[in-house]
Amino acid sequence: MSRPDPWQLTGDAAELYERYVARYILGPWAPLLVDAARLAPGERVLDIACGTGIVARTAAERLGPSGHVIGIDLNADMIRVARSLPPPVGAPIEWFERSALDLGLGDTSVDAVLCQQGLQFFPDRARAMWEMRRVLRRGGRLALSVWKDIGVYNNAVGAALARVLDADTATRFCASRQAPTQDEVRRLAIEAGFAVVDVRVSRQEIRLPRIDRFALDHLAATPVAAVVAATEPEARRRIGESVGEQLQRFADGDGVVYPEETYVLTAEVA
């Protein structure tokens, strides 16, 4: 997460984010984004809005010991958790608490920039894209993803929150999926000076464990955590039950498997 309130997570929420969001919701997409960046051993790579570091660690494994990864996020607790996790086998990683609008790195100082599901949180998307362009060397690559839509799972959780709690809580939960359109992402990259700009839809099946429990665990790692925690146990049970009922058609064993789509932008510095 990379923006002050209402996006900041604090305390235990960052640990829960790593346990549930990074592992189940974002983790499956990390290798695809790293593939899109065409990383080569020994390169210097920047991961913006790194969260607890799932993309940065994936990149480090690809780069090998001669490479270098920098992870940047505005949220201090995300960076704290990222630093606490075992380092991957591969490139060393540096973690910094910084804004996507002011990366604090030199011009043309990295070979590739990665940004997984961060652009929608930035208060000035054009400036963030310009910063990405500024730090890339000639021939450097950008690989960036934003959600295509609210998605099957988030839509179910939002509907459950609206039904059991209120529409405002549902809207706040779903806000992270209010991402730029395909055309807007392309325009931002072109206006920032990128070349060879391409935006494609990437699809895959996402697997979640027992969904009524997972939904409540996941909610504890979001900006609506306090609201959900303050409700009666029966209300929380109904939220989980509602999500499970809506996703019954995706049932697979004890969990669910559902389709997800994201836009992946790739671009280069000429």
Image (tube, rainbow, N blue to C red):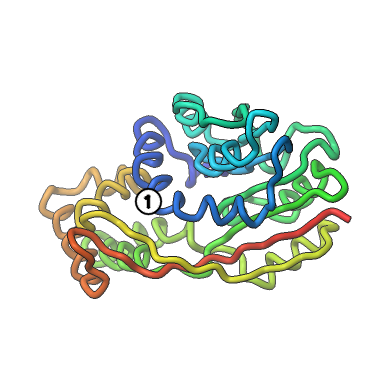
Quadrant assignment, res 73: top right
Q: Residue at x 69, y 29 (%)?
A: 66
Measured as percent of width and height from the top left, residue 100 is found at 67, 42
- Tell me: 169 left or right of 194: left
Measured as percent of width and height from the top left, residue 46 is found at 68, 39
- Tell me: 225 left or right of 66: left
| Residue under label 1 | 24
Quadrant assignment, res 199: bottom right
- Tell me: 216 left or right of 110: left
Measured as percent of width and height from the top left, residue 117 is found at 55, 54
Q: Residue at x 85, y 40 (%)?
A: 108
Pick the front one: 192 or 203: 203
View extreme (left): residue: 234
Q: Residues within 10 Å of mark 1 (few under 14, many from 20)?
A: some
Q: Residue at x 62, y 31 (%)?
A: 91
Pick the front one: 110 or 156: 110
**Which quadrant: the C terminus?**
bottom right
Measured as percent of width and height from the top left, residue 124 is found at 69, 52
| Tag count | 1
Label 1 SS: helix
* Residue type indicated by callout 1: Tyr
View extreme (bottom): residue: 249
- Tell me: 120 left or right of 238: right
Q: Is residue 148 above or below residue 5?
A: below
Quadrant assignment, res 125: bottom right
